[in-house]
């Protein structure tokens, strides 16, 4: 050992203890993020049902489905009046319902992706 009075040797197994604490902290963070994203996924799924019923009622209220049916049943009328038909269909689109469903679906997909990443990170931390 050195005769230097300022030289302090670290306690034995300090590095292993630090690594163990880092692993445990990473597991806690992965579990917390996985539970938060799981709650978000459940909320998105539960909100999709009312959003779908709202969009369905808006489609029925605006007559959007009748315009689509007209496109398939009387294509000659649609071809001759295509500009008016396009504007009529655009006016009757249930935009709010479509945006709500799209937003909720993307939120659900993003939360499922983050759950997969968190679980992968949790498994990876256990094997280090």
Image (tube, grey):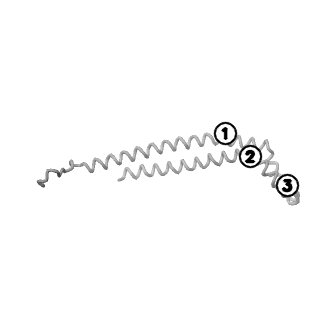
Assess disc 2: are there few (<14), some (14-19) or many (≥20) residues with their C-alpha within 10 Å of its C-alpha.
many
For residue 88, side relative to residue 127 (left or right): right
The answer to whether the residue labelled 2 contacts the one labelled 3, judged by CB atoms less than 8 Å apart, is no
Gap between marks 3 and 1, in whole Å? 32 Å
Measuring from the top left, give residue 108's x and y in whole percent. 58, 47
Specify which label sits upstream in the sequence, 1 or 2: 1
Badge 1 marks a residue whose secondary structure is: helix
- Residue 50's disc is 1
Specify which label sits upstream in the sequence, 3 or 1: 1
Measuring from the top left, give residue 91's x and y in whole percent. 79, 49
Measuring from the top left, give residue 115's x and y in whole percent. 50, 48
Assess disc 1: are there few (<14), some (14-19) or many (≥20) residues with their C-alpha within 10 Å of its C-alpha.
some
**Residue at 69% over, 47% down:** 98
Badge 3 marks a residue whose secondary structure is: helix
**Residue at 83% over, 54% down:** 85
Gap between marks 2 and 3, in whole Å? 18 Å
Q: Nearer the viewer, mark 3 or mark 1?
A: 3
Badge 2 marks a residue whose secondary structure is: loop
Assess disc 3: are there few (<14), some (14-19) or many (≥20) residues with their C-alpha within 10 Å of its C-alpha.
few
Judge by depth and name the residue closer to the eye, 3 or 94.
3
- Residue 84's disc is 3
**Residue at 21% over, 49% down:** 10
For residue 17, side relative to residue 45 (left or right): left
Q: Which residue is mark 2?
A: 94
Q: Nearer the viewer, mark 1 or mark 2?
A: 2
């Amino acid at each position: 050992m050195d005769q230097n009075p300022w030289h302090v040797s670290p306690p034995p197994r300090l590095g292993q203890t630090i690594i163990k604490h880092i692993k445990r902290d990473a597991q806690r963070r992965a579990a917390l993020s996985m539970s938060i994203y799981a709650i978000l996924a459940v909320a998105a799924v539960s909100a999709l049902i009312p959003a779908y019923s709202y969009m369905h009622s808006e489609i029925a209220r605006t007559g959007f489905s009748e315009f689509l049916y007209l496109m398939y049943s009387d294509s000659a009328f649609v071809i001759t009046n295509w500009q008016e038909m396009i504007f009529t269909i655009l006016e009757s689109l249930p935009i709010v319902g479509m945006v709500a469903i799209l937003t909720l679906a993307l939120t659900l997909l993003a939360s499922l992706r983050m759950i997969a990443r968190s679980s992968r990170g949790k498994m990876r931390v256990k094997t280090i």
